[in-house]
Image (cartoon, rainbow, N blue to C red):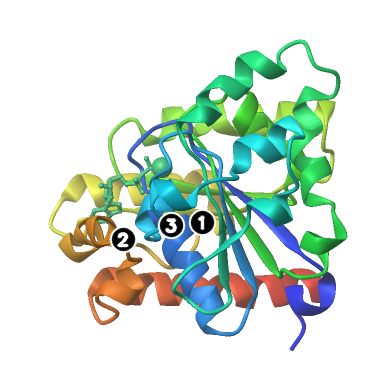
Amino acid sequence: MTDAAEAGVRIIAVANQKGGVGKTTTAINLGTALAAVGRRVMILDLDPQGNASTGLGIERANRAVTSYEALMGEATLAEALVDTAIPNLSLVPSTIDLSGAELELVDQPRRAHRLKEALSAPAIVDNFDYVLIDCPPSLNLLTLNSMVAAHSVLVPLQCEFFALEGLSLLLRTIDQVRESFNPALEIQGIVLTMYDARNNLSDQVAADVRGFLGTKVYDTVIPRNVRISEAPSHGQPALIYDHRCAGSQAYIKLASELLRREEARIAA
Ligand code: ADP
Ligand code: MG
């Protein structure tokens, strides 16, 4: 099989400046689905809220070394890595400490390149197929670091009225990052989340987004599903909490669509 396993690590920033659109849920469940088919996956929690860390069952007490120390150059990412309950899935956790990083880095040289430098260590490049960076809900220095470090951006987009406006701003930001920092930055894909088939607005938004971005939008759509929203309070990905629910099944489909598209990209 030709994919990341042969092509080297693929670093994907899961980003959208809006909160509550499904970034963390997508990072956790896509990561779990990729790990389940044998890919070596790291989820890098870059949100001071630490929702990815909590959602994977990593308690505060087990977050001694975090993405904050790695960004500040006080530790390596390898030192921050913790195992999760899921085989092939590791986490770099975060805590609220990370909220100080932006101010602390502001007058540092190469402040936008900190994460890229941390991720280029052989311990990361040689030991992972996918790194999914769970970004904060803002276009701040943390998100910029993730886009400078990443090969691509995966955008979860909630099917709601202002979705396209927010998307335009995000796409402009990606263009600016390409111009100034990372010319090779790609859009991995747009995934429509919290889709409600009973709601005409969901359909309208989905059609608009597909009209605007064409094949960059995944065929797979993530439905609104109560089991997905219950899972984090159990410290488990939805895929472990209830792998049969419609939400989990959608994330399994998303992972196989992503892998299929990766094969096509690498072959091209
Ligand atoms: P973000 O990381 O973009 O802020 P989250 O992934 O944390 O967004 O999702 C926001 C909230 O919505 C969380 O409570 C999460 O459990 C819930 N949620 C996410 N995706 C779904 C879904 N498909 N169906 C139902 N609830 C969802
Ligand atoms: Mg989040």
Q: Nearer the viewer, residue 135 or 234?
A: 234
Q: Nearer the viewer, residue 44 or 84?
A: 84
Q: Secondary structure at mark 1?
A: loop
Q: Position of residue 112 (x, y in %)?
A: 76, 27
Residue under label 3, please give it.
26
CB of mark 3 near ligand 1 (< 8 Å): yes
Q: Label 1 vs label 2: CA separation?
A: 29 Å
Please state which amino acid type lies under the numbered disc 3. Thr
CB of mark 2 near ligand 1 (< 8 Å): no
Q: Secondary structure at mark 2?
A: loop
Q: Label 2 vs label 3: CA separation?
A: 15 Å
**Eye-nearest disc, 1 or 3:** 3
Quadrant of residue 126 within the rendered picture: bottom right
Please state which amino acid type lies under the numbered disc 2. Gly
| Discs 1, 3 touching: Cβ within 8 Å | no
User: Is residue 258 toward the left or the right of residue 71 in the image?
Assistant: left
Please state which amino acid type lies under the numbered disc 1. Val
Residue under label 1, please give it.
217
User: Is residue 160 toward the left or the right of residue 122 in the image?
Assistant: left
> Relative to residue 147, is residue 224 depicted above or below?
below
Q: Around disc 1, counting alpha carbons within 10 Å, would you say few (fewer than 14), some (14 to 19), or many (20 or more)?
A: many
Disc number placed over residue 235 in the picture, else none: 2
User: Is residue 251 toward the left or the right of residue 75 in the image?
Assistant: left
